[in-house]
Image: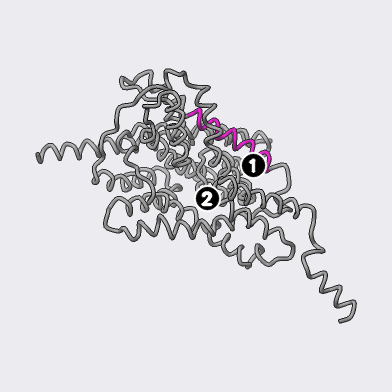
Amino acid sequence: MYNWDLAFKIFIFGFVGVFICLTVLMFSIQICGAILKGSKNKKS
Amino acid sequence: MDVFSLNSLLLKTGIFHLTVGHLVMWAIGFLFIYLGIKKDFEPLLLVPIGFGIFIVNLPLTPLADKGDLIWIFYHYGLEWEVIPPLIFMGVGALTDFGPLIANPKTLLLGAAAQFGVYVTFFGAIALGFTVKEAASIGIIGGADGPTCIYLTAKLAPRLLGANAIAAYSYMAMVPLIQPPIMRLLTSKKERQIVMKQLRPVSKLEKILFPMIATLVICLLVPDSAPLMAMLMLGNLFRECGVVQRLSHAAQNELLNIVTIFLGIAVGTTMKAETFLNPQPIFIFILGLIAFSFSTMGGLLLAKFFNLFLKDKINPLIGSAGVSAVPMAARVTQRVGQQENPRNFLLMHAMGPNVAGVIGTATAAGMFLAFLK
């Protein structure tokens, strides 16, 4: 009756997907911050 | 004037077409207006929504049928996906992402707070809603009104009124719903944890952030782009420092104007003949479940972090991962100060709070990727 298969896939891929996206964003911010800090140290 | 024409004139008035359903909807509309004016529950939305409910339930009024005035607001504003992204632009222009940039791991707390979205998604399917309807109900757990409206307008427009009301009601009730859950899941000692002061964030970092966030999220989840791109454009206006007029317009005039259209358009989706059935009650119950599980998700991940971190974080900030900005962060601050009056958690909680906005927009994009 219910489309549990699709729902389960959405749950797994959706929730994990949100984590993956925000984890990638977290590392991007950290890498960018490190580069900026490095270039600032180089200048000084 | 003869009797025949007087009769037909009378039949053209709304009075003879009134039903009990209309009267019930008037009462609901007046309740929202009362809550907005008297109790200060999200008045910017509940007042226009309440009035919208009232006028759409006046029989024979040419307001909400195809081609009518408010149908035009609804059609071009919501069905064409214009209003929620514009609200996001205003939200972006109002939001300082500094606490998030200073402590990027709070992004994960924002992700964990989407737990309620997916739990409720299952719950809604079990209650007999279709998969698309369940997705639109689940997103209430993100406590982000524009995202909820955006997703519902695309996946289940029939539920727009009930979902929007549930989302904004729970956002207004954050100070009532969250503290008991926060106390239940944390010990007194945990609530007293004092966190290290956040590092200062440079202007360049703040300018780069909206571009990096747009790039990452829109590349990974293209369906979230209308919300994410507008959120980050508004934030770029704010942070770049050279377009104050645009930033001011996005935060004030534009946001206010689209809020009027949003409120009226949402209110007019609540006609007696479509709204008065058991489904809105289920939606309100599921919305509460979603919101509670989202609060738990953020709290529990924060506790999990503390198993590994040297500098412990106060798990209360995890509850701010729901998007209700800045209300959820203020609740964290208040509950934290009840345990330790010298503990200032507000800025720490703003990180997960704004991360929740990004997380909910991403979750909505995920649903769209699967279901649209």
Quadrant of the image for the N terminus of chain B?
Answer: bottom right
Q: Main secondary structure of the magenta part?
A: helix
Vertical comparison of B290 with B368: above or below: above
User: Dot 2 corresponds to which residue?
Assistant: B150
User: Dot 1 corresponds to which residue?
Assistant: B130
Q: Position of residue B279 (x, y in %)?
A: 69, 42
Q: Could you tell me which residue is drawn at 26 percent across and 40 percent down?
A: B201
**What is the spatial separation of the Cα atoms under label 2 and label 1, in whole angstroms?**
18 Å
Q: Position of residue B108 (x, y in %)?
A: 40, 32
Q: Secondary structure at mark 1?
A: loop
Quadrant in the rendering for residue B292: top right
Numbered label tally: 2
Q: Position of residue A31 (x, y in %)?
A: 25, 36
Do marks 2 and 1 both belong to one polypeptide chain? yes
Magenta segment range? B280-297
User: For the residue marked with disc 2, what is the amino acid?
Assistant: Tyr
Q: Are marks 2 and 1 in contact (CB under 8 Å)?
A: no
Residue B296 on the magenta span: yes
Q: Residues within 10 Å of mark 1 (few under 14, many from 20)?
A: some
Residue B352 on the magenta span: no
Q: Position of residue A30 (x, y in %)?
A: 27, 35
Q: For mark 2, name the chain.
A: B
Vertical comparison of B203 with B102: above or below: below
Q: Could you tell me which residue is drawn at 60 percent across and 54 percent down?
A: B49
User: For the residue marked with disc 1, what is the amino acid?
Assistant: Thr
Residue A9 visible in the picture: no
Comes first in the chain, label 2 or label 1: 1
Out of B288 and B55, give the one closest to the viewer: B55
